[in-house]
Image: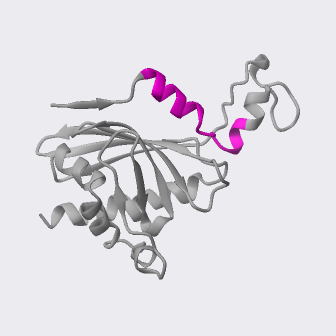
Amino acid sequence: MSTILLSRRLLALRLAAIPVGAGLSAGVLGASRDGESAAAGDGLSHAAESIRQVVEFDANPVRVYEALTDAKQFDAVTRLSDAVKLVTAPGAKPTSISRAVGGAFTLFGGYITGRHLEMVRGERLVQAWRAASWKPGDFSVVKFLLQANGAGTKVLFDHRGFPEGRGPDLADGWHTHYWDPLAKFLSSD
């Protein structure tokens, strides 16, 4: 099994370049929104939103990984969701997914873009991820941890660092645009 990882230095540089979103500003300055110091001035914010979801698929971890990292397969997944209008709209960018750490991806007609931070085939995919509607330079980090579950796969999913207030829509979007159509796609094998 081959493992592709960013060097610690490159990973640190990439993560340092990712703005965490609106929730970061107060925490980094050591102050909360109401002007009080955050947790004794340590700069930690305990109010940042994150999404954690657990999803199961009737396909092995390598098959799930391939569907998430192969442009042709992911485009087919997209076309099974209501996001098909994004990939078929005039001027939509084609689905493209690099197969290399540090490589770029463009999904949903260009609405979602980012870069791969870590790729371990059949085990883990970590991405710097953003939506076109976010402020320039705002990126979040998504992690897909794939675990064998009998003949299937359990995906432990984590999404952090997105702009404040976007959590409910993003949490719903993962089901609508990823999990439900991915389950349909994998069941058609």
**What residue span does the magenta drawing correspond to?**
8-24
Image coordinates for residue 108, horizontal then vertical, percent: 43, 66
Q: Is residue 163 left or right of residue 43?
A: left
Q: Nearer the viewer, residue 85 or 13?
A: 13
Image coordinates for residue 93, horizontal then vertical, percent: 44, 69
Q: Residue furthest right?
A: 35
Q: Work out whether 67 lies above or below 17.
A: below
Image coordinates for residue 92, horizontal then vertical, percent: 46, 74
Colour treatment of the image: one colour
Identify the residue shown where x is 67% and y is 36%: 47
Q: Work out whether 81 lies above or below 114.
A: below
Q: Nearer the viewer, residue 147 or 131?
A: 131
Main SS, magenta residues:
helix
Q: Is residue 131 left or right of residue 82?
A: right
Image coordinates for residue 181, horizontal then vertical, percent: 31, 65
Write down the quadrant of residue 117 in the picture. top left
* Residue 171 is one of the magenta-drawn residues: no
Q: Nearer the viewer, residue 166 or 112?
A: 112
Q: Work out whether 62 lies above or below 109.
A: above
Location of the C terminus (image quadrant): bottom left
Identify the residue shown where x is 40% and y is 64%: 177
Q: Is residue 64 left or right of residue 140?
A: left
* Residue 12 is one of the magenta-drawn residues: yes
Location of the N terminus (image quadrant): top left
Q: Nearer the viewer, residue 113 or 62?
A: 113
Q: Residue furthest bottom?
A: 90
Identify the residue shown where x is 69% and y is 40%: 23
Identify the residue shown where x is 62% and y is 62%: 133
